[in-house]
Amino acid sequence: MDRIAARPRIATVWLGGCSGCHMSFLDLDERLITLAEKAEICASPLTDIKGFPPVDVTLVEGAVANSEHLEHIQHIRQHTKYLVAFGDCAVTGNVTAMRNLFSVDDVLNRAYQETASPVVGVPSGNHVVPKLLDRVRPVHEVVKVDYFLPGCPPHADEIFAFVAGLLDGNPPRSDGRRFG
Amino acid sequence: MSKRLMIEPVTRVEGHAKISIYVDDAGEVQSAQFHVLEFRGFEKFAEGRPFHEMPGLMSRICGICPVSHVLASAKAGDQLLGVEVPSPAVKQRRLVNLAQLLQSHALSFFHLSSPDLLLGMDAPPEERNLFGLIEREPEFIRSGIRLRQFGQRIIELCGGKRIHPSWGAPGGVTQVLVSEQRDEIASWLPEAYRTVTSALERMKRLTESFPAEIAAMGAFPTLFLGTVNEDGSAEYYDGHIRIVDSEGNTVADKLDPHRYHSYLGEASEEWSFVKFPYYKPMGYPTGKYRVGPLARLNVADRMSTPLANRELREFKQLSVGAVCESFYYHQARLIEMLHAVEMIEELVADPELLSPHVRAKAGLNRYEGVGSCEAPRGTLFHHYQVDHGGLMTKVNLLIATSQNNLAMNEAVEQAARRFVSPGNLTEGMLNRVEAAIRCFDPCLSCSTHAIGQMPLRIEVRDRSGRLLEQVARG
């Protein structure tokens, strides 16, 4: 198992989800200050670091729902020691995957053609917005996941126990625990 | 042939977005667009499900303002039942709605925007964030973290969970508040007052350092839309819709939120997953309007609480008509936080809040309902139609942030024209374009967030969008 650096780098990313898992991360409250002493929070929606430097741990919120998610999660996997499926959408697809019961066209028609006026255009895969995948997938269907942290969202206490354990060299046992 | 600068991803906003800045052959900024990249399709996959399930499901639209979606959904459900919600339940709903306003505004101000305001727009990007502030302004940021915690704790005490509480339901709420919980809420109030008043004073002083940003980060005339009470005071849970213009004239008043579709339309464009709502009588895209804290203070005659009302009077002195500079969203947000703390104090002092009569029960009595409330970012509408068995047949959601979409696009373009010199790019220039967006605090709700491979890509495309050239800049 790879060793975590002395001042570990943590990234958090958002794929197809509601941001609730990130909000639960912020629910660490003053423990955020403790965490900032132990680790560097780099690429994250909370910072302005736009690239994705190599990191020790990445918490991935959300399911893989569009073409950009697919590219990004593969890039992230290559640059991350421990990749964590963070919350139910990442673990199982959850609410984000509920659209799998319908075709992409049906879902887009309902959201734009049938409710908007005027319909100047319908966003679906062009040079500025990504293409929706036919099927929303949990993260482990696309890349190898090292840990699963379920919950909608995971409770802040669990997030802290998990991250602090990982940083202190006591990662939770992952064998025999698999979600999704 | 125009060039396109892209800022991707836009950071320190709640969601996944990017910005295109189009540059002409002379090297001048021609136009800019704000693209929202998330899409999940709630309108479709809610179909066929029971309406009682909606508060729990719709909550998952957004982890930042789940309470707003729970409330709008429960209120649409109230109409389907055709019942009057018991007064103690209304009070608890109001309390939790204000708690969410407080935590969400605290997130926007302390966690996301104060790095720009306190460290400066040109501060090194690796420090210009919450964690940089923990080193530079530890007490300020700790107070902000605790203010957000206060809001979240109220939601947890009432709803059993901070995010996605299973609490709001058609006809009322599912849990009774007990005196120990109420007392804990009350015990936080003195600290909350101190934090909000000191942040508000600091923001007012900081404003003097940002004349260029005030003038060019979304400063233009639009309509403003928000909810008010009968007496014209700002309202967050119930009430009617008022629309004012940039000169402060009332354009429409006493509009029924249930009939939103008669005066608000939504357009769609291929370059953003968020639709473009507009005021129907003025057409698309002329009927541009803003919602949220700035709009609410512009439409309201007064605040119903004394400290916030005093601040509102001072705020209104900023302009003869409506305050049109989007930079003032920050100050408006702080005034609303002060109002929320005062209202929470008022509500917890009311013994009726502890009454166990929190839910009216009935079967399905109507087949269509609209629920609306003021979410932290603006007016929110949930519109449901159900069949005879109470299964959803049609859903339309008019989300607060989308109603600022036309204005956010204009703000991005204005900031790009004013601050960006394409031949001589600096990171601070681009950060100002993003900061224009942060004024609106968009919740690209329920969003996705991408990691750009490069800090900035410059793409040259022809009119059809075909990629002709790509240059990477660090």
Image (tube, coloured by chain):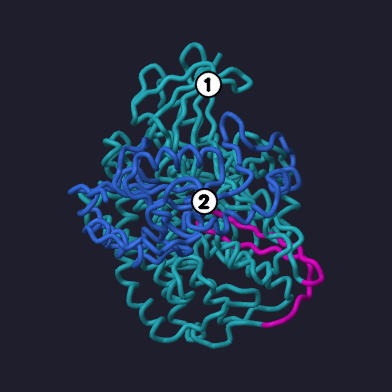
Chain colours: A blue, B cyan
Give the percent coordinates (x, y) of residue A41: 29, 48
For residue B33, side relative to residue B433 (left or right): right
The residue positioned 39% from the left and 71% from the top of the image is B153
Give the percent coordinates (x, y) of residue B131: 27, 49
Q: Chain of mark 1?
A: B
How many numbered circles does the render carry?
A: 2
| In the image, residue B380 lies in the stretch drawn in magenta | yes
Give the percent coordinates (x, y) of residue B41: 64, 51
Identify residue for label 1: B30
**Quarter of image, res A30:** bottom left
Tags 1 and 2 on a common chain:
no
Q: Chain of mark 2?
A: A
The residue positioned 33% from the left and 77% from the top of the image is B187
Mark 2 burial class by Cα count in 10 Å: few <14, some 14-19, many 20+:
many
What residue type is disc 2 on? Ala
Identify residue for label 2: A63
Please state which of the two labelled residues, at mark 1 or mark 2, is closer to the viewer: 2
The residue positioned 64% from the left and 42% from the top of the image is B276
Q: Which residues are magenta?
A: B361-389
| In the image, residue B411 lies in the stretch drawn in magenta | no
Element type at marker 1?
Answer: strand
Give the percent coordinates (x, y) of residue B365: 78, 75
- Residue nearest the viewer, comparing B452 with A103: A103
**Quarter of image, res B138:** bottom left
Query: Compared with residue B225, is residue B101 higher up or lower down, i.e. above or below?
Result: below
Q: Could you tell me how far apart the alpha carbons at marks 1 and 2 are, in whole angstroms?
A: 36 Å
Element type at marker 2?
Answer: loop
